[in-house]
Image: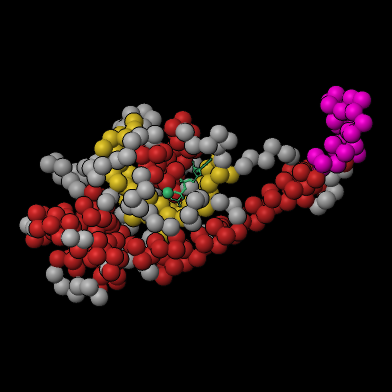
Amino acid sequence: MSSRDTDWDGVRLHVVTGKGGTGKTTVAAALALALAADGRKVLLVEVEGRQGIAQVFDLPPLPYEERRVAVAPGGGDVYALAVDPEEAMLEYLEMFYGMRRAGRALSKMGIVDFATTIAPGFRDVLVTGKTTEAVRRKGKDGRRIYDAVVLDAPPTGRIVRFLNVTNEVAGLARVGPIKNHADLVSGVVASPETAVHFVTLLEEMPVQETLDGITELRGAGLPAGGVFTNMVRTSGLPEAALDAAAAGRFDPMELALGLKAAGLADGDPNAAALAEALAQEISEHARRTELERQERVSLDAAGRPRYELPLLPDGVDLAGLYELAESIRAQGAA
Ligand SMILES: Nc1ncnc2c1ncn2[C@@H]1O[C@H](COP(=O)(O)OP(=O)(O)OP(=O)(O)O)[C@@H](O)[C@H]1O
Ligand SMILES: [Mg+2]
């Protein structure tokens, strides 16, 4: 194992949140691969019961069990776990009351569902409890089993409630095992061993949600991590051309001449129309690039490390996932 110099060297729990559909699951998986590189062991945890991790690694649905799902660059293992709140509750009853069988009966009667529905804070503490247990778990040699745990977490709108379990269960339990459990969870979550990362696109809504999320997190005394700007398009056009186009100063005539010079408009009576249409697309592209620049400025004002991940033109297959992991490493996030 090589020593590292990354932005998150002391962090053991990486929580990945963001607006729905911005790429939380994808980025969490790529981050896990990046963190596992060169002989490390990383656990990737999913909590929403949607089997997103199995999908990104192109595997059949994951059981409620830690399983090796991928080998990282340079050797190293990514394990994955899909936390099922019901199973977590049975485990919990077993752990604190020796009631696994009774628990099964309760769950058949729908009482487990009932309990976790009327008290979502309880459901969350089971899930975060399972996650922080994996963070704290040690082997016989006294060393942590996992070098890092990555949590594919609920979206921005729910993240603070989800992580702020002590508050959420305060109404349920002031003393006793639930309270102790919640205290163990906050001991990890609110510590410098945790970083809550945000995934966003360079668009107004997800950027605003990210900024609000960071503020809310800080207000709750939880550790804000980095911002992963996902699906970034590379422009390919020179700065000067973009500026001109954004200002509507792109000259279609010049473009027509260019097309002609390239032999693309030879003898085409519609060459002028083609140039006009292209010029319009270029202006549109330039406007979007300018908006993206403004979104970057807004994000940077939050003062968090920021990483950019490219839009993979063919979508995210396994090779694409490794490509994103490589990019994460190259930028020092892992
Ligand atoms: N960098 C990328 N390049 C291309 N496609 C991407 C990229 N990142 C994510 N995607 C695609 O975008 C879609 C949404 O990604 P993902 O499922 O990771 O988002 P999510 O935030 O976890 O969504 P949800 O809120 O539904 O859980 C997926 O089809 C994924 O393959
Ligand atoms: Mg997801």
Which quadrant of the rendered structure holds the N terminus?
top left
Image: magenta residue range: 253-279
In the rendered image, which quarter is residue 64 located in? top left
Q: Position of residue 49 (x, y in %)?
A: 33, 50
Question: Residue drawn at (38%, 54%), measured in percent from left and top?
Answer: 153
Which quadrant of the rendered structure holds the C terminus?
top left
Q: Residue furthest front?
A: 109
143 vs 271, left or right, is left
**In front: 110, or 297?**
110
**In front: 59, or 242?**
59
Whether residue 117 is in magenta: the answer is no
25 vs 147, left or right, is right
Q: Position of residue 317 (x, y in %)?
A: 47, 33
Whether residue 255 is in magenta: the answer is yes
**In front: 6, or 104?**
104
For residue 178, say whether it is visible.
yes
Q: Number of numbered discs present?
A: 0
Q: Residue furthest left?
A: 98
196 vs 210, left or right, is left
Question: Residue drawn at (34%, 62%), measured in percent from left and top?
Answer: 162
Question: Residue drawn at (41%, 52%), measured in percent from left and top?
Answer: 16
194 vs 245, left or right, is left
In the rendered image, which quarter is residue 5 located in? top left
How are the residues colored? secondary structure
For residue 11, say whether it is visible.
no
Magenta stretch, main secondary structure class:
helix
Q: Position of residue 72 (x, y in %)?
A: 36, 32
Question: Residue drawn at (52%, 53%), measured in percent from left and top?
Answer: 200
Q: Position of residue 75 (x, y in %)?
A: 33, 29
Q: Is 221 placed above or below 193 here? A: below
